[in-house]
Image (cartoon, rainbow, N blue to C red):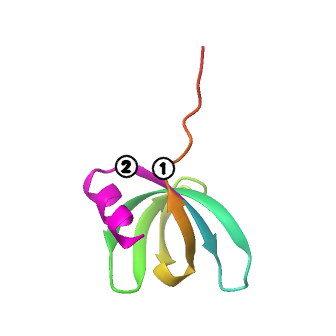
Amino acid sequence: MIGFLISAMENKEKVMIYYMDSEGDVSQRIIRIVDIGDAKVLAYCYYRKQVRSFKINNILSCGQPKRSVGA
């Protein structure tokens, strides 16, 4: 998972994550990673419209966001 996050950061790609907060609630977020530290990912969160930090241990899964098809 770390390899995917590093690659997305280097290529400035959006990432979809499933994240569990400190209260145990799971949410789906689309982020663009700014920096990766030892225990946290600093990223722009498109849901909150601000830079947020995410604990790496609380990221349950990550992948490329689904692209919508328009006419």
Disc 2 is placed on an element classified as loop
Question: 43 or 2: which is nearer to us?
Answer: 2
- Residue located at (42% from left, 64% from top): 43
Asked if residue 11 lies left or right of residue 59, the reply is: left
| Mark number displayed over residue 13 | 2
Q: Secondary structure at mark 1?
A: loop
In the rendered view, tell whether residue 37 sits above or below residue 51.
below
Q: Write down the residue under mark 1.
A: 64
Classed neighbour count for the residue bearing mark 1: other residues with Cα under 10 Å, few (<14), some (14–19), many (≥20) = few
Circles 1 and 2 in contact, beta carbons < 8 Å: yes
Any part of residue 10 in sight:
yes
Residue at image coords 41%, 74%: 41
Q: Residue at x 50, y 56 (%)?
A: 63
Quarter of the figure that contains the N terminus: bottom left
Select label 1 or label 2 by which is in front.
Answer: 1
Quick check: is 2 in the magenta stretch?
Answer: yes
Characterize the local packing of mark 2: few (<14), some (14-19) or many (20 or more) Cα atoms within 10 angstroms.
Answer: some
The disc at residue 26 is none
Tell me where residue 9 appears, x and y as whole percent: 31, 59
Q: Which residues are magenta?
A: 1-16
Please state if 22 lies on the left or on the right of 49 as rendered: right
Residue under the point 73% across and 82% down: 24
* Image quadrant containing the C terminus: top right
Rendering quarter of residue 30: bottom right
To which quarter of the image does residue 27 belong? bottom right
